Amino acid sequence: MTYEPDAIVVGAGLSGLVAASELLDAGRRVTIVEQEPSASFGGQAWWSFGGLFLIDSPEQRRMGVRDSLALARDDWFGTAGFDRPEDLWPRQWAEAYLQFASGEKRAWLHEKGVRFFPVVGWAERGDGRAGGHGNSVPRFHITWGTGPGVVEPFARRVQSAAANGRAAVRNRHRVDELIVEDGRVAGVRGVVLAPDSAGRGAPSNREVVGDFELRAPVVIVASGGIGGNHDLVRAAWPARLGEPPAHMLSGVPAHVDGRMLGIAETAGARLINGDRMWHYTEGIQNWDPVWERHGIRILPGPSSLWLDARGDRLPSPLYPGFDTLGTLEHLRRTGFDYSWFVLTQKIIEKEFALSGSEQNPDLTGKDVRLLAKRVAPGAPGPVEAFKEKGADFVVADTLDELLAGMQRLAEVPLDTELVARHVRERDRQLDNEFGKDLQLAAVRSARKYRGDRLIRVASPHKLLDPAAGPLIAVKLHILTRKSLGGIETDLDGRVLGADGAPLPGLFAVGEAAGFGGGGMHGYRALEGTFLGGCLFSGRQAGRAAARA
Ligand SMILES: Cc1cc2nc3c(=O)[nH]c(=O)nc-3n(C[C@H](O)[C@H](O)[C@H](O)COP(=O)(O)OP(=O)(O)OC[C@H]3O[C@@H](n4cnc5c(N)ncnc54)[C@H](O)[C@@H]3O)c2cc1C
């Protein structure tokens, strides 16, 4: 190979593309090595919903949201719960990221052509404590064009450099080793995998047809997390979240295999906070799967009644969309790998969004006419398709029929009398416009936010009101997604060794680096912060590597 790059980037996901773009902008030559075929260019981010965390944006202000860096900082640190010596760098990354999200982030993206849907979403509404977990205000800005819209400017930058001979993308090149010489990382070694015509996100073969070695003064690890490898997820599962589930769906393609983390560790990198992970409890089996065990996450509004596998209602404030890990922890204590939503047609129409670019053709395709249907009666097409074809949905005209359908999908006996009691008790609370049910109070409060009232939160109604029907039950599975820990780095993205000193020549970005520092989220996340973490860490490391 004659090409002599200034930097090698391992992984053509968002974080790798951002780092490469920064290096190219600084006049450096970059080679990206990527184990998957070119069809999967852009990695997980292409599949993503494209939700980005911004603080005090014009979009928020137009929706009447008053946000500030101080409020977001309270929210972030209350959510992260940093409590370990290893949080030294993650804390600094969190602070730097908050500054970025309230400062340059939007203008930087805007300049690259990225635009946002005007209604800001309210993800992770929290655990009910002002100083605790959660977003005090809506901050989830959906990119116009969703995940592909976030990837596009960086993909374009790399592809145009490749056309000019300043960048090279080597697909089917899997890194198996970091070359360490005289105490510095000097390149990568690995194998060339056989060509594969697999479509985007689909698993590709691992047949080895050759090997390769590439050298450069800088190597940037941008290899993603561990969510596609359930064995690694279970091995890292923390005791505080109970027993690891026996059955999980995959919210990420198989290439999110975590192998590169061990390879970086062998080269001297320190891995921290591997027990911190972000998995969802509202996963449904994809009726049209792209990868094995492919699950889709429902981004739920707050109105569905949430029941455990036996039929008992989840305690306050574990309502849909409030506290992802609090809910996961509670459900693990019940000992079962699934739970239930019970809702109405009226709720599904307004409150079910599905995470993923392919599940939102209107936003992904920037199709205004299709988008207008979101405010029209009826559920969005992809949601309706799941309702009709999804293995986890029960639709019924009466409560008895619904309970019979739920029993058919249940893996452990469902206490149908208990479910019926919860439904009736909840419905009686709607005889007045006030009452003691805290979930209904939260629904009423959410509707004070214009965005929720407009497209996200159904007006409170009785589940057994035939006018709101039919009744719907959804069996929800645990869905693997993000790794919150990873390779420890300083604020320049330089990888740190066991002694805390930088390992010369090596940088890490994106999910592989816990989105910055080895875990800038701490224990929990505010959402929209993963793509943002890839953007920010890729930018930091790309710029620092260009100076190296
Ligand atoms: C459906 C879905 C929806 C999401 N929605 C959102 C959202 O709305 N907001 C948000 O903030 N986040 C969201 N996320 C999360 C976000 O997309 C990811 O965390 C982020 O894209 C990770 O990017 P990355 O560059 O770190 O890693 P990846 O995208 O995983 O890319 C890593 C690349 O490295 C390659 N690689 C790995 N090991 C090797 C090796 N040894 N040799 C060569 N190549 C290797 C992989 O094949 C892969 O292409 C979503 C994710 C999914 C899947």
Image (cartoon, grey):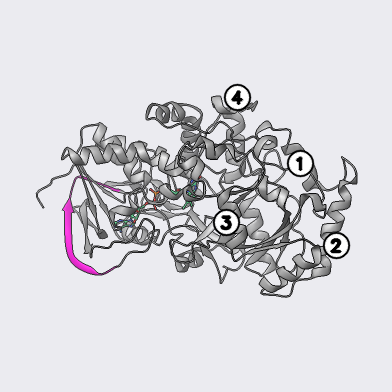
Residue at mark 4 to residue at mark 3: CA–CA distance = 35 Å
**Amino acid type, residue under disc 1 in the picture:** Ser
**For this rendering, which residue is in front, 49 or 18?**
49
Instruction: Determine whether 205 is above or below 118 in the image.
Output: below
Local secondary structure at mark 3: helix
Local secondary structure at mark 2: helix
Q: Given this view, does label 3 or label 2 mark the residue nearer the observer?
A: 3
The location of residue 461, given as percent across then percent down, is 80, 46
Residue at mark 1 to residue at mark 2: CA–CA distance = 22 Å
**Amino acid type, residue under disc 4 in the picture:** Arg
Is label 3 in contact with label 2 (beta carbons under 8 Å)?
no
Residue 385 is marked as: 3
Instruction: Determine whether 314 is above or below 72 in the image.
Output: below
Q: Is residue 503 visible?
A: no
Q: Earlier in the sequence, mark 3 or mark 2?
A: 3
The location of residue 26, given as percent across then percent down, is 24, 31
Tell me the crowding category of disc 4: few under 14, some 14 to 19, or many 20 or more residues within 10 angstroms, Cα based. few
Residue 421 is marked as: 2
Instruction: Determine whether 179 is above or below 430 in the image.
Output: below
Q: Is residue 206 left or right of residue 110?
A: left
Q: Earlier in the sequence, mark 1 or mark 2?
A: 2
Q: Is mark 4 within 8 Å of ligand 1?
A: no
Q: Given this view, does label 4 or label 3 mark the residue nearer the observer?
A: 3
Magenta part of the chain: 206-220
Residue at mark 2 to residue at mark 4: CA–CA distance = 42 Å
Magenta stretch: helix, strand or loop mostly: strand
Residue at mark 1 to residue at mark 4: CA–CA distance = 24 Å
Q: Which residue is mark 1?
A: 459
